């Protein structure tokens, strides 16, 4: 494969990355996706420039030939969701740890150039200080957080032991168009937006005062490309926060959405969710310094764009 590869490229974040790659001049992009949560429809506008392989990253024999010689492999394929990893730990373990190992192993054996790994802010758990910086000791609180952290460690070890270039980007609650709101495990903003457009109250788990660094999907896609281009001597084997740097509670986020829509709907409240992190906010200094991270979308602008997308599709 002499073109960039995106695992999980039919997913909500992966497909945004594919569109960004093509918009910035890639002639074609290869996508590896088992279509479990990804959808071919997410790639509709760019389908003619995408080679789509419906392959599971757990299947080493089918995966390895696809990564051979790839200049850059963006590894986003995963089974996400903190609560899903608690109720069904085995599938997420296999996809997120075994699958990541397979990708790295295939990249070493096939002499791929660089791996950009989608790590997760969940690795931090409940740290005492905010914002959270890469120098803090990780404190995973859920199988998902541990699995994503293990992937980072594997990346760093594959860099030091085998010379494979890797960069781990800790994604912070990514949102935007194409995020699927239909499962109980869906990202909170996709659920909020669906409820808002249906004029129904959302259910907030806990008191709603937990906060997140919601990051617009196009800013994350852009940062993935920057990580692929940054000098290997500086960035390889390292972990960077891929967040926006801001922090909003769920209560303020719902109020903001209601204001944007010109409605007033009181949320309902349910019990707190096991494994939930209380507060999350990225210190972006290292990503700004080493990768040139420069998020373009304020939270409100990202919300506006995303809401318009749901309005036109739901
Ligand atoms: C975590 C990671 C995130 C990762 C994601 C993958 C943290 C801080 N973030 O997101 O980087 O991308 O896993 O799945 O660990 N909630 C409600 N009502 C709902 C749904 C959710 O109140 O209907 C609440 C949750 O309890 C949580 C917050 O909204 O407090 C965000 O939940 P969710 O969108 O699922 O993401 P995280 O678990 O924070």
Image (tube, grey):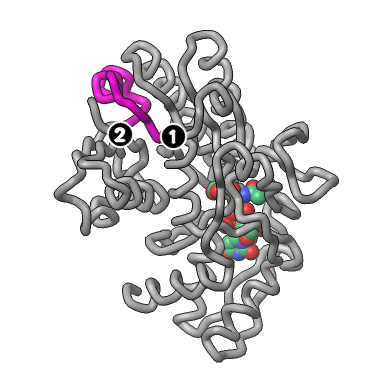
Q: Please tell me which residue is depicted at 49% across the width and 32% down the height of the picture.
A: 96
x, y (%) of residue 173?
57, 53
Q: Quadrant of the C terminus?
A: bottom left
Q: Nearer the viewer, residue 297 or 39?
A: 297
Rendered view: 134 above or below 279? above
Span colored in magenta: 56-75
Instruction: Work out how far the residue at label 2 is from the one at label 1, CA to CA, in angstroms.
Output: 10 Å
Question: Can residue 183 be seen in the rendering of this structure?
Answer: yes
Rendered view: 69 above or below 276? above
> In the rendered image, which residue does mark 2 sit on?
4
Left or right, residue 222 beside residue 288:
left
Q: Nearer the viewer, residue 184 or 289?
A: 289
Foreground disc of the pair 2, 1: 1
- At mark 1, the secondary structure is helix
Do labels 2 and 1 touch, CB within 8 Å? yes
User: Which of the marked residues, 2 or 1, is nearer the chain's N terminus?
Assistant: 2
In the picture as drawn, the residue positioned furthest to the left comes out as 48
> In the rendered image, which residue does mark 1 sit on?
228
x, y (%) of residue 304?
49, 75
In the picture as drawn, the residue positioned furthest to the top comes out as 161
Q: Nearer the viewer, residue 86 or 240?
A: 240
């Amino acid at each position: 494969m002499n073109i960039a590869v995106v695992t999980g490229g039919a997913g909500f974040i992966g497909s945004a990355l594919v569109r960004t790659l093509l918009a910035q001049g890639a002639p074609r992009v290869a996508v590896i996706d088992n279509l479990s949560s990804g959808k071919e429809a997410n790639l509709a506008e760019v389908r003619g420039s995408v080679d789509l392989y419906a392959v599971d990253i757990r299947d080493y024999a089918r995966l390895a030939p696809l990564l051979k010689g790839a200049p850059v492999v963006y590894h986003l394929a995963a089974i996400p969701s903190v609560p899903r990893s608690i109720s069904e730990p085995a599938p997420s373990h296999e996809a997120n740890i075994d699958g990541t190992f397979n990708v790295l192993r295939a990249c070493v054996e096939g002499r791929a150039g660089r791996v950009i790994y989608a790590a997760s802010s969940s690795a931090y758990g409940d740290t005492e200080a905010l914002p959270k910086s890469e120098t803090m000791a990780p404190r995973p609180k859920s199988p998902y957080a541990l699995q994503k952290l293990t992937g980072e460690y594997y990346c760093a070890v594959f860099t030091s032991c085998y010379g494979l270039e890797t960069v781990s980007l800790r994604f912070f609650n990514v949102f935007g168009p194409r995020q699927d709101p239909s499962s109980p495990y869906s990202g909170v903003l996709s659920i909020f937006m669906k409820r808002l457009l249906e004029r129904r109250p959302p259910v907030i788990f806990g008191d709603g005062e937990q906060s997140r660094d919601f990051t617009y999907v196009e800013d994350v896609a852009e940062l993935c490309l920057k990580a692929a281009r940054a000098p290997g001597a500086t960035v390889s084997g390292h972990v960077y926060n891929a967040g926006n740097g801001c922090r909003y509670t769920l209560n303020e986020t719902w109020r903001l959405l209601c204001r944007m829509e010109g409605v007033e709907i009181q949320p309902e409240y349910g019990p707190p969710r096991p494994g939930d992190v209380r507060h999350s906010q990225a210190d972006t200094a290292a990503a700004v310094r080493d990768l040139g991270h420069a998020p373009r979308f304020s939270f409100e602008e990202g919300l506006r764009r995303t809401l318009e997308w749901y309005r036109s599709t739901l």
